[in-house]
Amino acid sequence: MHLNLAEKAILVPQSDDETYNQSLPGSRDILPSRHFSISRSVSAIESGNLSFDEASSRKHFRRQTHSILRYRRTSSVREEVGGYINGDLTHRGLVLRYCGQAEPLDFNEVYSSSVLRSCRKVGEGVYSEVFMYKNSQGKAIVLKVIPIEGDKFVNGEYQKKFEEILSEIIITSELSKLKNGQDYRTGGFVDLVNVKCVQGCYPEHLIDLWELYRDNHGTDNDHPEIFEHDQLYIVLELGNGGQDLEAFTFKNALESYSAFIQVALSLAVAEQKFEFEHRDLHWGNILLSHTDDKEVEFVFNGELIAIPSHGVRVTIIDYTLSRMVYAGECQYNDLSQDEELFSASGDYQFDIYRLMRNQVNNQWEKYDPFNNVLWLHYMIDKLINGARYRLKQSKKHRDAIQDMMQLRDELLEFKSASEYAQLLK
């Protein structure tokens, strides 16, 4: 057993009757709020300093847990990474090698207004601004722009150093490459198209897009005008994975069940290949898009697994808290001193952080794939109780909801996503 009875009680819902009844004829369109048998009277909530509501979960979470960003990503990457990089290179040199550059490029030349056609800001994070544009082939590309190595605090946080961004680049790159794996293959992780190191003034056309986003949606971030003319940035060019799970509308639960299985198999593949744990797989980090492909294929331990797509495809993003082993070195984020992360309240997501801490005994270098199971349990509960559906009154939908409810009751008996994946072979 991985959880004691008290911990398992946290994960047991009070009732699913309302949820299932919602799919019956005459039901309301909006599911009731989820209630778990756990006290949520955290001192920060009582003092009025924190607030939470489901509709703005990621915005509130980002500010509640900003202290995690003050604790540097811990990486045992030495001067040598793998067998193909010169051991004498500094972290700066290693990052530039990944970028295929000898020196940083000019920000305004690389990402000029003529290059960034049909560009718009689509999101933001504590570390980054996120834009999307169409490249010369008409393909949508997401730009994650991350300031690094500067002395200024950005959005109340330290800027990342070359060493830290190297770790993120490695994780993003290696997970992206799993789409071409041999014995272990999945296309379920965001595609890393390119990575560039740039320097200079923030381009005026991107500032205009930033201000337009601020005026229409609001922002928690500092204005880009705070940066100096010699500021360094890492730009991750990523594939467009679609809408996040919180915003996506499924036709019915057959689609969402397929999405769950796709996430589970992707985690299983990464567990076996890299001892990977995502550690932050809330529904803002699961993207969905529509697909005409009838099946989604995976290779697990050399065996092909093809599952019905039911018209949806999943992409997993954001590895800020993730842990993996690459080239014999462990990449992880040490959260042991971040009490704020573990005291946040208001959603099942925050219970998962505390359960993970118990699993690894607050030793975050430790590998425990049961942490992936915890996030799968979180996801399937969101699919049952929080996801949006257009056709909730069909028998297919009701049957799939019942199947997911049964799986949720059994899921915590698995030790890893890999163990669950064995059932799908």
Image: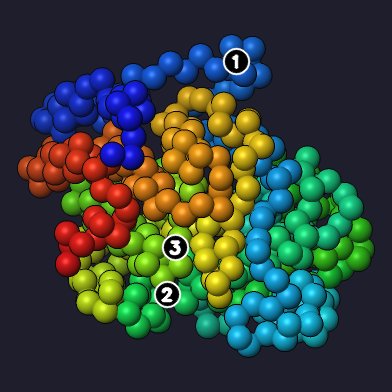
- Alpha carbon of mark 2 to alpha carbon of mark 3: how far? 14 Å
As helix, strand or loop, the secondary structure at mark 2 comes to helix
From the viewer's perspective, is 405 left or right of 244? left
Closer to the chain start, of discs 1 and 2, is 1
Q: Disc 3 marks which residue?
A: 275
- Residue 359 in the image: state x and y as whole percent: 44, 41
From the viewer's perspective, is 244 left or right of 156? left
Q: Disc 1 marks which residue?
A: 43
Residue beneath the point at 56% across and 48% down: 364
Closer to the chain start, of discs 2 and 3, is 2
Residue beneath the point at 52% across and 66% down: 325
Residue beneath the point at 18% across and 51% down: 254
Residue 307 seen from this side? yes
Q: Nearer the viewer, mark 1 or mark 3?
A: 3
Up the image or down, 26 lies above or below 128; here it is above
- Residue 275 in the image: state x and y as whole percent: 44, 63
Up the image or down, 208 lies above or below 133; here it is above
- Residue 107 in the image: state x and y as whole percent: 80, 72
